Image: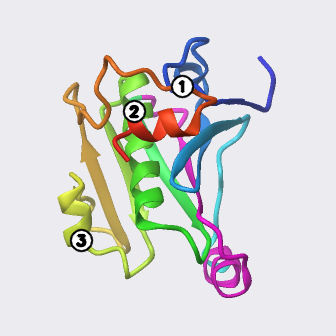
Amino acid sequence: MPWFENESDLNDPQGKILCRAYGMIEIKNGVFDQIKFKPWPRIITNLEINSWGHRTHVFGKRKDHCVLYYNQPFFHKNFLALKYIVSNRGTSFASFQLAQKILDLVAKIKCTDALVCEINNERITRRLLERWGWEEHRLDTSGRHFIKRFYGNFPDHFPEEKPFPSTDSKATENSLGL
């Protein structure tokens, strides 16, 4: 298995999404582009969030581009951790929401019990997360920890009968309900 590879077909014909533990979901111009797989997890620091993230929004190009990093912890294979979301000044809310829906689909392919994350951005409210199926978790620790539990009951963002074409962006928009 190559260290770095990608998948642009969400039907996962080669089983890459199922087998790979670390990935980046890329959304460009409101449309799913690809999932890039990595051989190691994405590790971030508060310094990176506060400096690089701020600079990306202030000085970065104004384009609709969103990248969501997720990890499947080695000792907790039934969970996916939403590690980091990178967006530009021009990223639409629809792109952000589509990245989250694709993560739900990845969780479904991997038969994951739950998604977990720690929210550092105060603009992402508890109310929004609850609307999307997240609930507060680990109230005994510092930080804003959330969990989205599935246990076999996955949201039906994408009807099963619709394929996910990887080349025709207009057909992809239609199949994703955009």
Residue at image x 53%, y 47%? 31
Residue at image mark 2 = 175
Magenta segment: does it hold 74?
Answer: yes
The numbered mark, 3 or 2, whose residue comes first in the sequence reads 3
Residue 140 place in picture, x, y as percent:
26, 68
On residue 60, the disc is: none
**Measured along the vertical axis of the image, is residue 72 above or below residue 16?**
below
Label 2 crowd (10 A; few <14 / some 14-19 / many >=20): some
Q: Amino acid at mark 3?
A: Arg
Q: Residue furthest bottom?
A: 58
Task: Give the residue type at disc 2.
Answer: Ser
- Disc 1 is placed on an element classified as loop
Image depth: mark 1 or mark 3 in front: 1
* CB atoms of marks 1 and 2 within 8 Å: yes
Q: How far is the residue under mark 3 from the one under mark 2?
A: 29 Å
Specify start and end residues of the magenta stretch as a single range: 48-77
Residue 53 at x, y = what percent? 64, 77
Q: What's under tag 1, amino acid-wise? A: Pro
Q: Which residue is mark 3?
A: 126
Quarter of the image for residue 177 reads top left
Using the rendered view, name the quadrant where residue 112 is placed.
top left
Q: Is residue 106 above or below residue 42?
A: above
Q: Splitting the image into 4 quarters, where does residue 89 fall?
A: bottom right
Q: Earlier in the sequence, mark 1 or mark 3?
A: 3
